Image (cartoon, coloured by chain):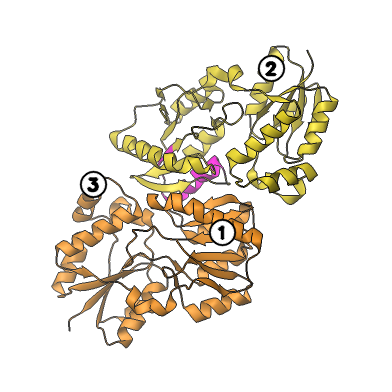
Chain colours: A yellow, B orange
Amino acid sequence: MGLTALVAGRGRLPVVLARRLRSMGVALAVFALEGADGELRDLSCHFREFQSLALGDLVSGLLSLGVRELYMAGLVPKSLALRGEALDEVGARILRSLDRRDDHSLLGAVVSFLSAHGIRVRSYLEHLSDMLAEPGLMAGRFPSPEEWLDVSYGRRVLKAILPLSFGQTVVVRGRSVVAVEAMEGTDETILRAGRICPGGVVVKMMRSDQDERYDVPVVGDDTLEAMARSRCRVLAVEAGRTILLDKPAFLERADRAGISVVGIRP
Amino acid sequence: MGLTALVAGRGRLPVVLARRLRSMGVALAVFALEGADGELRDLSCHFREFQSLALGDLVSGLLSLGVRELYMAGLVPKSLALRGEALDEVGARILRSLDRRDDHSLLGAVVSFLSAHGIRVRSYLEHLSDMLAEPGLMAGRFPSPEEWLDVSYGRRVLKAILPLSFGQTVVVRGRSVVAVEAMEGTDETILRAGRICPGGVVVKMMRSDQDERYDVPVVGDDTLEAMARSRCRVLAVEAGRTILLDKPAFLERADRAGISVVGIRP
């Protein structure tokens, strides 16, 4: 079996995935985007740094290594992806061709481009299914009726926002939206909410047609840390479609921090 | 003619309105919310500070002064309105009775409560119509085709968000949403966008059923200041339904700062 590639953004998800793939005996070529975890170097047979929208470079790199399959995991700050200097000619052409540049369309365009060169994007979910959120209470006390109202209000707001595909998280307090995520990311959204009106509930979901191969919401220690600083006591995530990194430790840490974690239905 | 009341939030709008009413010979009782401009004291016959959701207090204060008509103007940070200690018993009861606590519902509840006590909420627009945005280019150079695409993308995003009534502003760059406003307000949203990805276009609109009496979007020097710091070069606002404070000076300042101001259709 040849090399499998991992295009790695920021955060711990690519590391967790790389470890699992390695333990299965998969030989990995890691293409690390700016800010990717340094540990990935040790987990790979081939390691290359590259720019997020240098898609021509990426494909020629993949093909020269004989790679036919890849995983994409980790956070790519969109401001980075849209930065002019991060583009190669192919990336710029693809970007120009897009009518919409929401997260969904950008990722879709990357996947199509890879497929057109015979490179298949595989789903990381099959290797991480034990880390998926379950329906119902997973950690902490049961949310209060008031908190449940806020969760369901947040869910209602997300339903309207998710199709626009610019962010997946809202923070709600007293049935009012405190903060909505866009390019700043989840942690910054939670911290902002804490500065304005501490103690809200955090709701995170994915759009119905979002691709489960490479774009599932992920929560981890950083999320808990931001919530603790903002005195947010409830985290509601989509059951079956959210990765808790690494689940047992995550839930234990949430418990200790007095944060309830609940899995909700879309 | 008896006293007319002005319930004044933050910002310059209440001051501008109070000046106009005074110049028409209207005797004003100002009820100043936390953070209201100190100049209001000099523009009023009666001046009282009061808490945003102390609605029982407000109504008894109004009735004891024989007030039958009032204006509401200026920014009320929602975090303030939702703060427990700012509520009196009546305010708390009204808040509890609301299924939705979006801006629209909260303001609507206040207006209904006042009406039920025979106090009419008048529209400030009739006195400020000369400050309304016009369709088309009002200041600066004509936006580039790329900027127009961003304006129309922002408009599309706002159309979906406005019915949720938690914010009126988005910042867009390269047909991607950089920042969405919720409880932090317009200026903070623009400054955040500048930190993430400077140079976006700012689009501000109102929801179709928003009450023109007391809830029209307002832009002023603070908006221009935030835009200049974030290198945002285009401000698109809804023509006929946005107040430019004070219009001639505002447009001149925008011009000097290299900021294009355009009025768009809803």
Question: Does the image show residue B199?
Answer: no
Q: Which residues are magenta?
A: A185-202
Say if mark 2 contacts mark 3, CB within 8 Å.
no
Q: At label 2, which amino acid type do we have?
A: Leu
Q: Residue at x 38, y 77 (%)?
A: B128
Q: Residue at x 54, y 46 (%)?
A: A182
Magenta residues, dominant SS class: helix
Is residue A190 part of the magenta span, yes or no?
Answer: yes
Mark 1 vs mark 3: tell me if same chain: yes
Q: Residue at x 18, y 65 (%)?
A: B59
Q: CA distance from mark 1 to mark 2?
A: 44 Å
B191 lies above or below A159: below
Q: Nearer the observer, disc 1 or disc 2? A: 1
Residue B3 appears anywhere in the view:
yes
Q: Position of residue B109 (x, y in %)?
A: 24, 56
Q: Does the CB distance between marks 1 and 3 fall below 8 Å?
A: no
Looking at the image, residue A35 lies above or below residue A68: below
Label 2: chain?
A: A
The image shows residue A181 at horizontal and vertical percentages of 51, 45
Q: Quadrant of residue B198?
A: bottom right
Percent coordinates x, y for residue A168 in the rendering? 50, 39
Residue at label 3?
A: B96
Instruction: Depth check: give the residue in front, B182 or A55.
Output: A55
Subunit of label 3: B
For label 1, the residue is B151
Circle 2 residue: A21
Q: Is residue A79 above or below residue B16?
A: above
